[in-house]
Amino acid sequence: MELWYTEEHSPDVKFSIRVDEHLFSAKSNFQRIDIMRSNEFGVFLTLDSLMMVTEKDEFIYHDMIVHVPMAVNPDIKKVLVIGGGDGGTVRELTRYESVLEIDLVEIDDMVVSACRRFLPLMAEKLSDPRVNIFYEDGLRFVRKKEGYYDLIIVDSTDPFGPGEGLFTKEFYGNCYKALNDCGILVNQHESPYYKVYAESLKRANERIRQFFPFVKLYQAHIPTYPSGHWLFGFASKKFDPVNDIKEDYWNNLGIETKYYNTQLHKGSFALPNYVKKLIEKQGKI
Ligand code: SAM
């Protein structure tokens, strides 16, 4: 009997992966957590049946959410990661000796323990001595901080369920306040392709623009996310993510990556016209 994981990408589009083994399934206080093994994508995590990360394509997402801001500001030392319980974002951050402190605020400790058990290559660096894990709501956590972080990365689920608060005006305003004068906010910014994701993209972009002088979107192709065309938001108090890239500095670090490179960094901010149109009324991008 064949087992398939299926996610609805739109009311008329479904995406399925053949599953070899259902490794883990549990209901936490926040969401349904499943971990499965597949031939094509290796082991993968879903939350409330929505695709989060797969062993095969996670490098794309984690390269782009971390190395883009890190190539813009070489002085990033204190980082806040909100969500990110699978550990992939933290793993990439720990590759920088310049990073001294990583606060991971993950609402669901069951996600961390499941990923430590079944996705060790992603979660392994959660035990790095620079990492402090706080099991609480990122929306509440960030209210307590002022002018502290160089970088905030919001590696959250989509804007419903526990992740909903991480797409609000209040949250973005508190992220602005929690960042220092050179602060950068990067977030997973949904997708321009299917209606429900495009609408959350627009809303998030409108809200972020109310606080940050520099707001640009960049893109990557992530096969297991709806439509594959996935965007990230780069918001900053001081830096333009393309004009201010420190290309020689980053290349001299010698960090081996499977996806990110500095030419791709610059190219990823060149958006298709339909995406520019989707958000242009909030001002030039
Ligand atoms: N890369 C994935 C994506 O783009 O959808 C996200 C991966 S990571 C597993 C998402 C994490 O965000 C989950 O572990 C979830 O528990 C966490 N999360 C959701 N809402 C949160 C909140 N309000 N505060 C902190 N963590 C939250």
Image: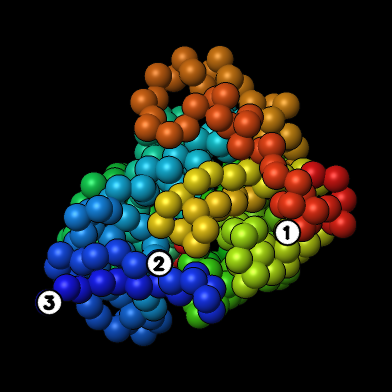
From where the camera sits, is residue 84 visible?
no
Image quadrant containing the C terminus = top right
**Could you tell me which residue is drawn at 40 percent across and 19 percent down?**
254
Task: Give the x, y percent position of residue 216.
Answer: 72, 45
What residue would you read off at disc 2? 15
Q: Nearer the viewer, mark 2 or mark 1?
A: 2
What residue would you read off at disc 3? 1
Task: Work out whether mark 3 precedes mark 2 in sequence or the reverse, and give the earlier one.
Answer: 3
Task: Work out whether mark 1 precedes mark 3 in sequence or the reverse, and give the earlier one.
Answer: 3
Marks 1/3: CA distance?
45 Å
**Could you tell me which residue is drawn at 19 percent across and 62 percent down?**
37
Where on the image, by quarter, is ligand 1? bottom left
What residue would you read off at disc 1? 205
Numbered disc 3: secondary structure: loop
From where the camera sits, is residue 4 visible?
yes
Marks 2/1: CA distance?
27 Å
Q: Give amino acid for label 2.
A: Phe
Numbered disc 2: secondary structure: strand
Categorize mark 1 by other alpha carbons within 10 Å: few (<14), some (14-19), many (20+): many
| Depicted 28 relative to depicted 166: above or below | below
